[in-house]
Structure formats: structure tokens, C-alpha cells
Amino acid sequence: MFPIENSREVLEKGRMVNPDTGIVEEYQELWEDLEIKKIAGGREYVSWVLKLGGGDRDPLVRGIVVRVGQWIQGVLRDGKKGGSSSFSVARWKFDEELGWVHVLDVGRLQLDREVFTAKEIRVGDIFDAKNGWKWVCVESHRWT
């Protein structure tokens, strides 16, 4: 990670397997550091992590959803038998007037609004999605 001088941007450089070729390749990603906010008149910052798990789900499907302050982002990988796989991403942002707004949706990640509008999410909480998947809270933090 290389901070870019006089900006809120950070350049990430690394190497990883390209899923299309199976070859380790170099990559670069540009990130922007965002200010985390307390939402809806809250007195604390909130973060949590949900992982796909439990139930009768396909063991080749993996997913994670992370909330940090006013942002929630989820990632889902469906590793189909035979080598092909699909990848999904969804993002929400809290708006003081509208509540949680879906701002990005690529693929088929499905997460019901009730999950992230719950009053308090604690480690061990399980949320059943309409598609039969179960999301399990594996981390939950609040701080001032």
C-alpha cells in the first residue's frame, strides 16, 4: 500500500492468481480513504462481518458482507463444478433522508434489507435470506 501524497488515495500493488488464466499476475488498485460516519443520530461507530454459512447451501458458494460505518459491501463467489465460477458484488450507503440505498449491484448477491437494518448485530446472529442461504455474523464492533 502506497499513500499518494496530498490526497486521500492509496495505491495497492500486489500479485495474485488471475481466475481467468490461473496464472499469478501483478495488479494495481487505487483506493480512496473515506471518512467513516455515525449514522441516523447514532452515538457510536458500527462495523460487522457476515459470512455465508450454515443451512443447505452449496459448499462451492462463498460470500462475505462487511459494514463499516455508513458503508456495506458484499462479495459472493459461486465456484461451479467444472472450473467456471461467477463473482458478484453489491454495495449500500446510508443516506440520512433515504436510509440504506443500494448503490452497486453486479451479479446475483442477494441480501435482504432486514439484515443490515437490524438494531444491533452481534456475533453468532444468523440471517436467513429469501434464497435459502444463511448469513452468520462472525465479527461485530461498536466504538465511540
Image: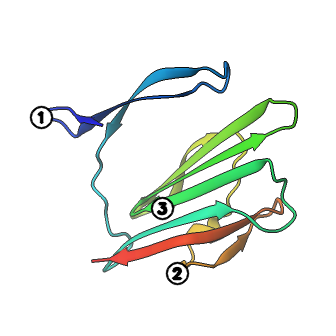
What is the x, y in percent for residue 55? Answer: 83, 68
* Residue count near mark 3 (Cα–Cα under 10 Å), binned few <14, some 14–19, many ≥20: many
Kindly identify which residue carries mark 2.
Answer: 119
Kindly identify which residue carries mark 1.
Answer: 6
Q: Quadrant of the N terminus?
A: top left
Q: Residue at 67% across / 47% down in the picture?
A: 76
Q: Is residue 104 above or below residue 26?
A: below
Would you say 109 lies left or right of 42 here? right
User: Of residues 9 and 99, which is closer to you in this image?
Assistant: 9
Would you say 143 lies left or right of 4 here? right
**Sequence order check: which comes first, mark 3 or mark 1?**
1
User: Of residues 28 and 88, which is closer to you in this image?
Assistant: 28
* Residue count near mark 2 (Cα–Cα under 10 Å), binned few <14, some 14–19, many ≥20: few
Q: In this view, does 34 lie above or below 115?
A: above
| The quadrant where residue 52 appears | bottom right
Q: Which amino acid does label 1 sit on?
A: Asn
Query: Mark 3 and 1 residues: CB-CB less than 8 Å, in contact?
Result: no
Query: Mark 1 and 2 residues: CB-CB less than 8 Å, in contact?
Result: no
Q: Which amino acid does label 2 sit on?
A: Lys
> How was this image coloured?
rainbow
Residue 67: which disc?
Answer: 3
What is the x, y in percent for residue 8? Answer: 22, 40
- As measured in the structure, the alpha-carbon distance from the residue carrying label 3 to the one carrying label 2 is 14 Å
**Sequence order check: which comes first, mark 3 or mark 2?**
3
Determine if residue 108 is in view. yes
**Sequence order check: which comes first, mark 1 or mark 2?**
1
Q: Residue at 66% across / 70% down in the picture?
A: 136
